[in-house]
Amino acid sequence: MRAVDIAHAALCEAGRRDLADEILWFEDDGGYLEVDSEILTEDEWQLVNRAESLARASLGLPPIERATR
């Protein structure tokens, strides 16, 4: 299973298939997620970041430290 599949499954499990279908996986820095959507709420970003952390953990990588507003 690819890391992006893990992130997708995590978002679906959280009841957010809409977000799951909008994610894009980039290989830079071991891998990270972006969302192909214009605006996300703080709660939505928190879910995406958690899914990204699970995906990165599947590759043996730590979570990405993201700057907060």
Image (cartoon, rainbow, N blue to C red):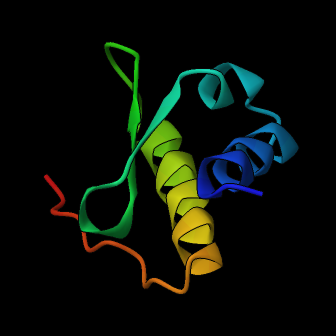
Tell me residue 46's x, y (percent): 48, 52
State which quadrant residue 21 falls in: top right
Identify which residue, 27 or 19, lies in the foreground.
Answer: 27
At x 52%, y 47%, the residue is 48
- Give the residue drawn at x 71%, y 43%: 11
Extreme-top residue of the structure: 38
Q: In this view, does 60 lie above or below 1?
A: below
Residue sitting at x 32%, y 13%: 38
- Pinpoint residue 47: horizontal percent, then vertical percent: 57, 49
Vertical order, 51 against 16 (above or below): below
- x and y, in percent, of residue 35 in the image: 41, 29
Indicate left or right for 14 with 33 as reference.
Answer: right
Query: Does residue 29 sit above or below 26 in this rendering?
Result: below
14 relative to 46 in the view: left or right: right
Judge from the rendering whether residue 69 lies leftward or rightward of residue 12; answer left or right: left
Q: In which quarter of the image is residue 58?
A: bottom right
| Camera-nearest residue between 25 and 19 | 25
